[in-house]
Image (cartoon, helix red, strand yellow):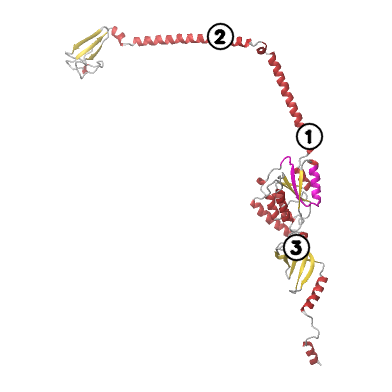
Amino acid sequence: MSEAKSNDRHSPPQEALSVSEVTSRVKEHLETRFADVWVTGEISNLTRASSGHIYLSLKDENALLRAVVWRGAVPLLAIEPSDGLEVVCHGRLEVYAPRGTYQLTIDRLHAVGTGALEARLRKLHAMLEQEGLFAPGRKRPLPPFPTRVAVVTSPTGAAIADFLKTLLSRWPSCEVFVVPSRVQGAGAAEELAAALATAARIRPPVDAIALIRGGGSLEDLWAFHEEVLVRAVAASPIPLVSGIGHEIDISLTDLAADLRALTPTDAAVRIAPDRVQVAATVNTLGSRLQSGLQQRLDLARERIQQLARSRILSDPSWLVRDRRGSLEQDAARLKRLGTGAMERAGERLRAAVGRLEAGSPLKLLSRGYSVTQRDSEADDTADAMPLRSVASVPLGSTLVTHLADGRLWSRVERKSTDAF
C-alpha cells in the first residue's frame, strides 16, 4: 500500500492548473484582499515616464514593493515624491498577468512625519542662499499706486476671495488678472512657475504680481519650497509679493520674493494703498498748497503796497536828485584826493631833484674840484676813466683835467706818492 501511495504522489494530476489560471486566481485573491491598503516605506528607483506616469519602489529593511502612480493621480498627491523620502501611500494591489508580477497602484501619498522634509528644506535653503537668491540687495520696491496687478493662485480657494475683497476695497481702480494654478500636490510647483511666466507676459505689463495661498501643514505648503518655483520667483521681471499660509509660515518662496506678506490678505494690503488715506493725504496737501499760495499772495500784495507808498514811486525825480548829489560829493572828494596826490608827488619830485643836484659832478666842479684822466687821443693805450692812483700814470703821459669852465692838457714830468 505504501508503495502505491508513493507512486500516486509523484504522478501528474488528472486536472493541472495552467499558468493563466494560477495567475488569475492569485490576481483575484490579491486584488480583492488588498483593494484598499495603506503602505509605509522609503521611495527608491523613482522614474518619471514621458507619458506622465511615475514608477517607483517602496522598501523597508526586509522587502521591496513595486508601485506606480498613473498620470491622472499625480495631481492628487499631497507631495512631490522623490528618492529617499519616507512616505505612507494609499492604493490597491494589482497583478500584471503577462509578467506574473504585482504592484501597488498609488492614488494618495503623504510624507511620514516632517523630519525628512525639513532636512531637504534645510539643504535646499543653504544652496539657494549661497547662490544669492535671498539677498536683500535683489529686492525691488513695489509701485506706490498700481493700476494693474496679476495674482497667481487657485481660483477656487478662500485665499483669492480674501485677496480680491481687500485689494478692491482699498484701491478699486486697480485692474486684477487672476492666473489660475494648483497650489498643492505633486506638480504644483511646476504649474505655479508656469503661471508666473504667464503673468509676466501680460500686455500691457502689470505693475506687480501676487503669489498667494492659504495656510496648511508643511506637506500642504511643500510646493512653495520646491526649487523650480523658488527660482521662478527670483527670476520674475516684475516686482512680486508672496503671501503664503499664515504669519508663522515662512517658505523659500517668501525669501526669494521682493516682499513677503504675512497672509494673502496682507499681500493685498502691501500692494494696494488705502484710498481713504490717499484721499485724506491729497486733501491735506491741497489745503497746505492753498494756504501756502494764499500766504505768498498776501506777502506779494503787502510788498506791492509798500512799494506804492515808497518815495521812488511817488516822486521818481527824487532818485535822480539823490544820485546827482552823491555824484557831486564823489566828484569833489576825487578832486580833493587828486589835488593832494599831485602836491605830494611835486614835493617828492623836488626832493629828488635836490638830491640829484647835490650829487652832480658839475656841482662838485663848481666848488673847486676837478676830474683828471689820461688823454686817449694822444695815447691809444689810455682809457677814459678818471685817475685814482699815481701808480697808474706813466711819466710823459698826457693828461686832460676837467674844470667847471673848461679843460687843461698837461704832461707828467715827475710823480710822488706823498699826499698834500
Q: Distance between the residues labelled 2 and 3?
A: 110 Å
Q: Residue 328 carries which label?
A: 2
Q: Nearer the viewer, mark 1 or mark 3?
A: 3
The reply to whether discs 1 and 3 touch (Cβ–Cβ < 8 Å) is: no
Secondary structure of the residue carrying tag 1 is: helix
Q: In the image, what residue occupies the spot 81% across and 50% down?
A: 158
Residue that badge 1 annotates: 280
| Amino acid type of the residue tagged 2 in the rendering | Glu
Residue that badge 3 annotates: 71
Residue 151 appears at what percent x and percent y? 75, 48
| Amino acid type of the residue tagged 3 in the rendering | Arg
Could you tell me which quadrant the C terminus lies in? top left
13 left or right, relative to 327: right
Furthest toward the front, the residue is 203
Q: Magenta segment range?
A: 143-168
Compared with 409, 6 (above or below) is below
Q: Nearer the viewer, residue 261 or 419?
A: 261
- Could you say which quadrant of the image residue 273 lies in? top right
| Amino acid type of the residue tagged 1 in the rendering | Ala
